[in-house]
Amino acid sequence: MLERASEPSPIGSGLLLQPPGLAVLRRMGLLDRMLERGARVTGLDGRTRSGRSVLALDYAKWEPGCFGLGVHRGALWHLLQETALADGVAIEGGVEVKDAEAFRDCDLGLVTSGSRTALRKALGFDDRTHFYEWGALWANVPMPAGWRGDTLAQRFDGTRRMMGMMPIGRDAAGNGPYLTMFWSEKLDRIEALKARGWTAWRDDVRGHWPEAHAATECLGNFDALSIGAYADVRVTPWSRGHIGLAGDAAHGTSPQLGQGATLALMDAEALCAALEAEPDVPRALATYAKSRRNHVAYYQWASRMLTPFFQSEGRVLGLFRDGFMGYAAEWPYVGWETLATLTGHKTGILGGRLRP
Ligand SMILES: Cc1cc2nc3c(=O)[nH]c(=O)nc-3n(C[C@H](O)[C@H](O)[C@H](O)COP(=O)(O)OP(=O)(O)OC[C@H]3O[C@@H](n4cnc5c(N)ncnc54)[C@H](O)[C@@H]3O)c2cc1C
């Protein structure tokens, strides 16, 4: 495994793993160790500043006992790294793969370098990726006493202001529990936001969500915040000869639906299954892509559709979202499809589910 970072290390915000992603970890024999670290998220609670419910999810309505798992990226990364090393995988840091040369002597080359990777183009893939103008500032903060540790909470104000607080449990060293804080921002406004100063931003947070303001008190300046930028990856097919794409490199989306890591885990499992059934690598890569097509295509479509309702300049979209989405989720068919979407089980727009 070749990794660009010189010291392969766990960096990054928290991730919400959905039930199908947790099922992959269970089949790998890793779920129990992940559960020790992560935070069981049993519900989503997205509201306007005035308290109107926009996005509500109770995982137990999908299936009793069902939950998502908020995890520190570092905790997931360490678990997977340890497992890979124990399996004899050599992990080489400080190697930036730039072109096909790195894959010359491989039986199978897998590109998993994330949504913004330049490798797709360098390797001749038909890459029509769209980069979003909006992203997020994020940081991990200690979970304050009394905070609901089982709910991913969000507060919306139109489509230009959104803040989220996601329980993610403990990091790989056992410190925590933490929350990941997200603050939505248009990427080209971040410099202006910094220029206004830390106190002005803290005032914005206080006005937007007073409880979250208190929870993020520990952040001292903008250096404590990282910038997350998203891409809507559009590339077909996912393989060229013996080189394939997986994870965000194949199908990165905006993270509104919290599915990216789950999709990546499912890719890995599907590729293993394809290689077990088909010794010819190009054919196995085609089988793998076909087996993932419907599930991935649905979440790409849903992310494209939903993102402007949460991050855009569209005032009308915000009004529509606030007036309609909360009610619509109460209607039987729409409510069930929303639940299936948010829990990661949908494989088609009108219907379609992952096989159990
Ligand atoms: C702010 C934010 C919040 C998110 N929240 C969630 C969430 O709650 N739930 C969820 O499921 N998903 C979430 N996502 C999406 C999630 O992070 C991705 O879907 C997931 O990390 C994809 O994993 P990956 O392994 O495909 O790619 P990545 O995690 O992007 O990993 C790519 C790796 O490749 C390395 N690399 C890049 N280029 C090269 C190169 N040329 N040579 C060698 N190495 C290279 C990078 O250093 C990195 O280690 C979020 C994303 C963001 C930005």
Image: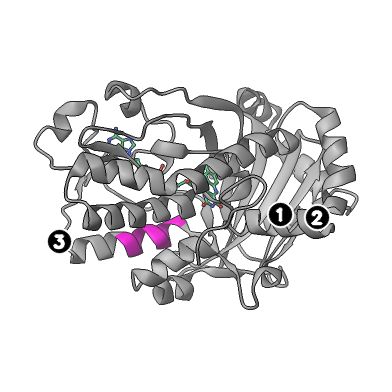
**Relative vertical location of residue 74 with respect to residue 139 in this rendering, above or below:** below
Q: Report which residue position mark 3 lands on.
A: 88
Q: Quadrant of residue 26?
A: bottom left
Q: Which mark is residue 318?
A: none
Residue 304 seen in render: yes
**Relative vertical location of residue 339 with respect to residue 203 in this rendering, above or below:** below
Q: Secondary structure at mark 1?
A: helix
Give the dominant element type of the magenta stretch: helix, strand or loop.
helix
- What is the tally of numbered marks visible in this picture? 3
Which amino acid, by three-letter code, is at mark 1?
Thr
Q: Give coordinates of residue 246: x percent, y percent.
A: 36, 43
Q: Residue at x 8, y 36 (%)?
A: 105
* Left or right: where 272 falls relative to 197: left
Q: Report which residue position mark 2 lands on.
A: 329
Residue 5 sits inside the magenta stretch:
no
Q: Secondary structure at mark 3?
A: loop
Q: Residue at x 86, y 48 (%)?
A: 49
Q: Give coordinates of residue 216: x percent, y percent.
A: 67, 53
| Ligand 1 image-quadrant field | top left
Tag 1 near tag 2, CB within 8 Å: yes
**Span shown in magenta:** 73-80
Q: Residue at x 37, y 31 (%)?
A: 237
- Camera-nearest residue between 142 and 182: 182
Q: Give coordinates of residue 62: x percent, y percent.
A: 66, 68
Which amino acid, by three-letter code, is at mark 2?
Ala
